[in-house]
């Protein structure tokens, strides 16, 4: 059942990618093992475990309880290796290379764990390290590394492994094209995320993009989803409005954003606006005032593909 749910969500991610516009053209299937930095490049280090390989049907053997999240983002293959310093079994660094099927999947799983507060590193399209964990993504590849602890020699190895793996991935660094519609004014850096399915927690919505905006110390969350066609988008919009009406207050009125929408107030999301624009559903909710929220929303809608 876990694998079925993951593949269904991955299909939603494929639809989102196809409707959002082209990313970098697909290249040959990457050789993950070839991207592993040789232990011989690092004095005193050897391979303690691996390389071990996993595919969708076996990923749960490595990520027991966590495989579904990767499958939802389009996971294809994983190569896992563990490096050891000297003879100390507690002085190791693990490196995992995930082929996520495309840039949208790699960015999606990367951004799911990243927080806006992390300091970006020049690894691949983007990377970071926080404590004993480092991660990065480039093209279809998501890179995750973890040291046994924060001893300087382990952290040095951790960062060297992630940087080395990224350097072997071909192609120029480029964000997924689906993010290009996001307005720049007020966008909180590194707050963008790709949700593979059930946007806003609703099964009647497919995947989409969310991002946080801040103006004058007040924040709101923006979201949009490509539903596929206008008829489906209308049904999704009506279902969302009905849900909001059951939980809060929906204002009557005409909005001049996209093909029209509504303003609402409800306990979980707060005050917000949601609109339909062609095959897209978009909205914004949170602490920004109505004028600022809807100015950002209107700019987003103008940037969405027809």
Image (tube, rainbow, N blue to C red):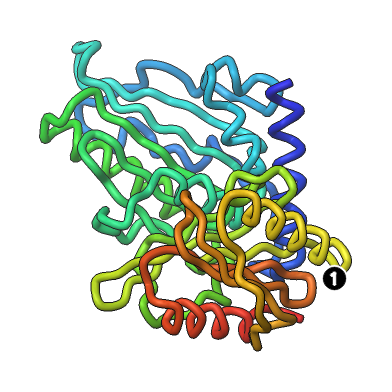
Q: Position of residue 136 (x, y in %)?
A: 40, 49
Where in the figure is residue 46, as x and y percent of width and height? 31, 22
Q: Relative to 44, is 250 above or below? A: below
Residue shown at the point (36%, 27%) measured from the top left: 94
Quarter occupied by the N terminus: top right
Query: Compared to 187, does 43 lie above or below?
Result: above
Q: Along the line of sight, which residue is nearer the eye, 231 or 153?
A: 231
Instruction: Write down the quadrant of residue 40 in the picture.
Output: top left
In this rendered view, identify the residue nearer to me: 217 or 126: 217
Secondary structure under the numbered disc 1 in the rendered image: helix
Q: Is residue 12 left or right of residue 257?
A: right
Q: Crowding at label 1, few (<14), some or many (≥20) Cα neighbours within 10 Å?
A: some
Quarter of the image with the C terminus is bottom right
Is 262 or 48 nearer to us in this picture? 262
**Is 217 or 180 nearer to us in this picture?**
217
Q: Which residue lies at the image location 43% right of the left edge and 25% below the top edge? A: 81
Q: Is residue 202 left or right of residue 150?
A: right
Q: Residue 183 in the image: x percent, y percent? A: 48, 80
Q: Left or right: 139 with respect to 148?
A: right
The residue singled out by tag 1 in the image is 230
* Residue 203 spot, x, y in % from top left: 71, 43
Quarter-of-image position of residue 224: bottom right
Q: Say which residue appears at 81% left-offset and 66% top-offset.
A: 234
Q: Residue at x 36, y 35 (%)?
A: 145
């Amino acid at each position: 059942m876990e694998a079925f749910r993951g593949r269904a969500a991955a299909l939603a991610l494929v639809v989102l990618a196809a409707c959002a516009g082209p990313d970098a053209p697909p290249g040959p299937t990457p050789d993950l093992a070839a991207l592993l930095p040789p232990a011989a490049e690092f004095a005193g280090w050897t391979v303690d475990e691996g390389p071990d390989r996993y595919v969708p049907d076996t990923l749960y053997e490595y990520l027991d309880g966590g495989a579904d999240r990767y499958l939802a983002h389009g996971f294809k293959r994983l190569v896992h290796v563990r490096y050891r310093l000297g003879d100390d079994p507690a002085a190791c660094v693990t490196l995992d290379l995930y082929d996520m099927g495309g840039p949208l999947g790699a960015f999606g799983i990367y951004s799911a764990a990243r927080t806006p507060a992390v300091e970006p590193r020049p690894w691949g399209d983007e990377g970071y390290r926080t404590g004993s964990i480092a991660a990065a993504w480039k093209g279809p590849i998501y890179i995750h590394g973890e040291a046994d602890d924060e001893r300087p020699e382990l952290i040095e190895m951790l960062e060297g492994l992630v940087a080395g793996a990224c350097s072997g991935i071909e192609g120029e660094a480029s964000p997924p094209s689906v993010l290009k519609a996001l307005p720049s004014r007020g966008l909180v850096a590194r707050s963008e995320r790709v949700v593979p399915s059930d946007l806003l927690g609703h099964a009647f919505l497919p995947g989409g993009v969310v991002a946080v905006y801040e103006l004058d110390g007040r924040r709101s969350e923006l979201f949009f989803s490509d539903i596929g066609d206008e008829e489906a988008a209308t049904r999704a919009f009506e279902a969302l409005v009905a849900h909001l009406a059951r939980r809060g207050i929906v204002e009557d009125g005409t909005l001049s954003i996209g093909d029209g929408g509504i303003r609402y107030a409800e306990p979980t999301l707060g005050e917000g606006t949601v609109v339909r624009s062609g095959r897209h559903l978009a909205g914004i909710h949170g602490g920004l005032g109505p004028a600022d929220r809807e100015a950002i929303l209107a700019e987003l809608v103008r940037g969405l593909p027809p």
